[in-house]
Amino acid sequence: MIETVSSNKAQGGTQGVYRHASSVTETGMTFSVFVPDHAPGAKLPVLWYLSGLTCTHANVTEKGDYRAACAENGVIFVAPDTSPRGEGVPDDAAYDFGQGAGFYVDATEAPWSANFQMRSYLETELPSLIAAEFPADMARQGITGHSMGGHGALTMGLRDPERFRSVSAFSPIVAPSQVPWGEKAFAGYLGADRAAWRSYDACALIEDGARRGELLVDVGAADNFLGEQLRPEMLERACATTGIHLTLRRQPGYDHSYYFVSTFLAEHVAWHAERLK
């Protein structure tokens, strides 16, 4: 059962924010869903959007420019939170670990393992809820995301190509096992055994045999995280080596912000819609 936090008519559809009690994270979880106007009984494809460090569902819901494109293409847009939250949920003072920084993993280390089960939440619980509560055609799903959420989109899409017909990302962390953000998070959530990290690392997944026909990735050429944290050239090499068709667009002058994401998000919606027909 879900609670409607808000519901607003917008750009040819309805933008809602919802909350439910999650049995997976053992917390309340909030997410947003945009549903285009549609014929009675119609089922629409679903595009998942995973947000980045420090974000909630609200960042893309309030700053993203996707609703008109979703309405035009008949695509439901789902934006979950980035981590469990609330009193009694473990946290860390740093912005890149703890609440707001779930990294879309199932944590195995205490104290995080009690609540930080974002992989299972997004692979099992929330999809079941979306299927039950919204006019969603779960046979037609795509996924995208930004930064930490780009990492989540790539890894989920590579692990489950049957569920996700299309995968794209904005400014993704493509090899978190080899950059500071990921090394810190994975050590804390998953422990010291780096073998346990590989299923959450896009480049490692490709090295270990994961395949997709194509990927779309946009990065800002002026992104100050590009060289140290994002490392798109590593994904470029992994895809070139294995025959995955990667469209990697380095957008001149753009940074890591939602000014960048909002500029190209409608293009990503249309790209996914074409593949979800």
Image (spheres, rainbow, N blue to C red):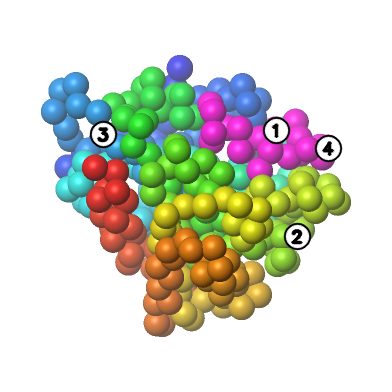
Q: CA distance from mark 1 to mark 4?
A: 10 Å
Q: Secondary structure at mark 3?
A: strand
Tally of numbered tags: 4
| Mark 1–mark 4 CB contact (< 8 Å) | no
Disc number lying in front (4 or 2): 2
Q: Secondary structure at mark 1?
A: loop
| Residue 232 lies within the magenta run | no
Provide the residue designation for mark 4: 110
Q: CA distance from mark 2 to mark 3?
A: 38 Å
Residue 197 position in % (x across, y down) = 73, 50
Q: Residue furthest top?
A: 1
Residue 183 position in % (x across, y down) = 75, 60
Provide the residue designation for mark 3: 44
Q: Earlier in the sequence, mark 2 or mark 3?
A: 3
Q: Residues within 10 Å of mark 3 (few under 14, many from 20)?
A: many
Seen in the picture, residue 43 relative to 237 is either above or below; the reply is above
Three-letter amino acid code at disc 3?
Leu
Three-letter amino acid code at disc 2?
Glu
Provide the residue designation for mark 2: 183
Q: Earlier in the sequence, mark 4 or mark 2?
A: 4
Disc number lying in front (2 or 1): 2
Provide the residue designation for mark 1: 115
Q: Earlier in the sequence, mark 1 or mark 4?
A: 4
Q: Please provide the residue range marked out in magenta.
A: 105-125
Using the rendered view, name the quadrant where residue 235 is placed: bottom right
Residue 137 position in % (x across, y down) = 31, 30
Three-letter amino acid code at disc 1?
Asn
Q: Can residue 41 be seen?
A: yes
| Mark 4–mark 2 CB contact (< 8 Å) | no
Q: Residue furthest left?
A: 39
Q: Can residue 58 be seen?
A: no
